[in-house]
Amino acid sequence: MRKVRTASGATAVQIVSKSGGVRRIVEHLGSAHDET
């Protein structure tokens, strides 16, 4: 599970599986824009 900042400033939560040094996105849980 990791959080990444997208170019639009949203936080995307992804489940990644790393096998053989290749990161593969298993499931994209969605992205949320911080409302401040």
Image: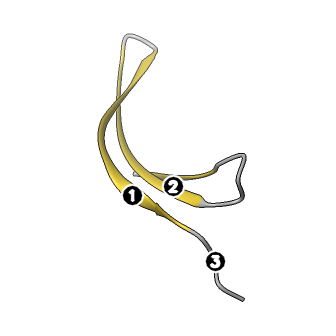
Percent position of residue 22, x then y: 43, 15
Contact, mark 1 vs mark 2 (Cβ under 8 Å): yes
Residue 13, percent from left and from top: 45, 56
- Local packing at callout 3 (Cα closer than 10 Å; few below 14, some 14-19, many 20+) is few
> Mark 2 falls on what kind of element?
strand
Q: What percent of the width, then of the height, locates residue 2?
A: 48, 51
Q: CA distance from mark 1 to mark 3?
A: 13 Å
Q: Residues within 10 Å of mark 2 (few under 14, many from 20)?
A: some
Q: Nearer the viewer, residue 11 or 3?
A: 11
Numbered disc 1: secondary structure: strand
How many numbered discs?
Answer: 3
Q: Which mark is residue 30?
A: 1
Which amino acid lies under the numbered mark 2 shown in the image of this protein? Ala
Q: Residue at x 70, y 53 (%)?
A: 8
Badge 1 density bin: few <14, some 14–19, many ≥20, Cα 10 Å: few
Of pointers 3 and 2, the one earlier in the residue sequence: 2
Q: Which mark is residue 34?
A: 3
Q: CA distance from mark 3 to mark 2?
A: 11 Å
Left or right: 31 with respect to 26?
right
- Asked if labels 2 and 3 touch by Cβ distance under 8 angstroms, the answer is no
On the image, the x and y values in percent for residue 12 come to 51, 55
Residue type, mark 3 in image: Asp
Left or right for 7, reference 29: right
Disc marking residue 16: none
Q: How far apart are the alpha carbons under marks 1 and 2?
A: 6 Å
> Which one is in front, 21 or 25?
25
Q: Amino acid at mark 1?
A: Gly
Question: Earlier along the polypeptide chain: callout 1 or callout 2?
Answer: 2
Which quarter of the figure is the C terminus placed in?
Answer: bottom right
Residue on which disc 2 sits: 12
